[in-house]
Amino acid sequence: MRKIAIVSEHASPIAQAGGVDSGGQNVYVAQVARRLAAMGMQVDVFTRLDNPYLPAEMEWDEKLRIVHVPAGPARSLPKEALLPYMGDFSAYMDRYFARSEGYDLIHANFFMSAMAALPVARRAGIPLAVTFHALGRVRRQHQAQADMFPDARFDIEDDIVRRADRIIAECPQDKKDLIDLYHADPSRISMIPCGFDDHEMWPMDRAAVRAALGWDPDAFYLLQLGRMVPRKGVDNVIRALARLRRNGTVDARLCIVGGETGDPMDAATPELVRLRDIARDEGVLDFVDFTGRKARHQLRRYYCAADVFVTTPWYEPFGITPVEAMACSRPVVGADTGGIRYTVVDGETGFLVPPREPAQLAAKLDVLARDPALAARMGAAGLRRARKLFTWDSVGMQLARTFEELAGHAGVPIPAREVPEGQALRA
């Protein structure tokens, strides 16, 4: 396999994570592209032009190029507003493919990317692999009227599931949802998780990084890090903090990292305004540190400075941040849903709790606050699990093997091969 097109219409690998539409998918696309390029493949990432000052093409790394596709206005738009421009996206890819030396496979990320890429793949006679990252029917179950995508998304996803050569599920729940809600053929699903970069995330001395961040050396710190949108359940963590402090025995603090900008007071992130109001109403505003968005190279310090990483979204297709926290040897208390249910081993690497249940979350946090030795054991177990199962090198090898198989059987869908847990396929 010589050349791969990765399509990620709204999530550019060069965007800084932490905003409303910039998070795990951006990290996934960047890391997968880098790993495949490092294996010797030419990788072109097609993503929508959302800034008029960006070049049409940019060499991002050796054998790795980003192609900015003109589809819709060249400015940032919510991903829910992009569906009308997917025809233009697809047409541009068609023209680009026609004047290129050809590709062996397309890997589409998100349903709109797959929608744009499917006709291109068929005309080029090459396989299409799809990672959905989120499924419309699952999103609608959890977000109801807050889901701004039209119902047309369901039919589009049904068509993609029927026609894609391979679907990459990110966790067992993702695979089950594809089968139960979309009647996907299990033989054409490969389960390959997300990962962490072991050159980016590793344990550091907690006292030293706390001093660097100006944190109280003796307080019990919770960390919430990621996109600032309601479904991430950050309000639930604030309410749990309030309960933890009200019992009078734990000096608990919460650090919230994320936002559209580096200014935590910037109204560009409405969710931060809402969360600040909740913290004020709960009487814990003085104990919550809103940092705004931070660069990737700064995140390890926050993971390592915290006593526990907390993430309680309503639903989560995978969730990269819990794995990164585990890679920094921190226990994770997460929502018992989606990918978190797969990455966090309840009672071993942390705890699983129901989403939107601050009392139950507070109870588990109290256990860790009172038993630092248990927290340390869970952090160490999480580190072992992350290194065994969830490195991007392992993810890249599994994807490469899957793509090699597809490219070798172009036009003939072949059954997926199950990978024993923790065993990376070798390219």
Image (cartoon, rainbow, N blue to C red):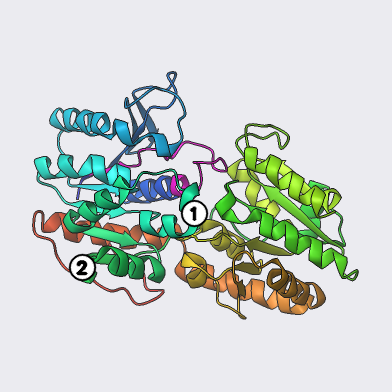
Q: CA distance from mark 2 to mark 1?
A: 27 Å
Front residue of 312 and 169: 312
* Residue 261 part of the magenta segment: no
Mark earlier in primary sequence (2, 1): 1
The amino acid marked with disc number 1 is Gln
Q: Which mark is residue 240?
A: none
Q: Position of residue 15 (x, y in %)?
A: 49, 36
Q: Which segment is the magenta one?
A: 4-27
Residue 40 seen in the current view: no
Q: Dot 1: what SS?
A: helix
- For the point 72% across and 42% down, the residue is 291
Residue 272 found in image quarter: top right
- For the point 38% across and 60% down, the residue is 395
The amino acid marked with disc number 2 is Asp
Q: Position of residue 330 (x, y in %)?
A: 66, 66
What is the crowding at mark 1: few (fewer than 14 residues within 10 Å), some, or many (at least 20)? some
Q: Dot 2: what SS?
A: loop
Q: Which mark is residue 185?
A: 2
Work out whether 204 lies above or below 105. below
* Residue 20 part of the magenta segment: yes
Q: Which mark is residue 143?
A: 1
Can you say which quadrant of the picture contains the C terminus? bottom left
Front residue of 271 and 227: 271
Q: Main secondary structure of the magenta part?
A: loop
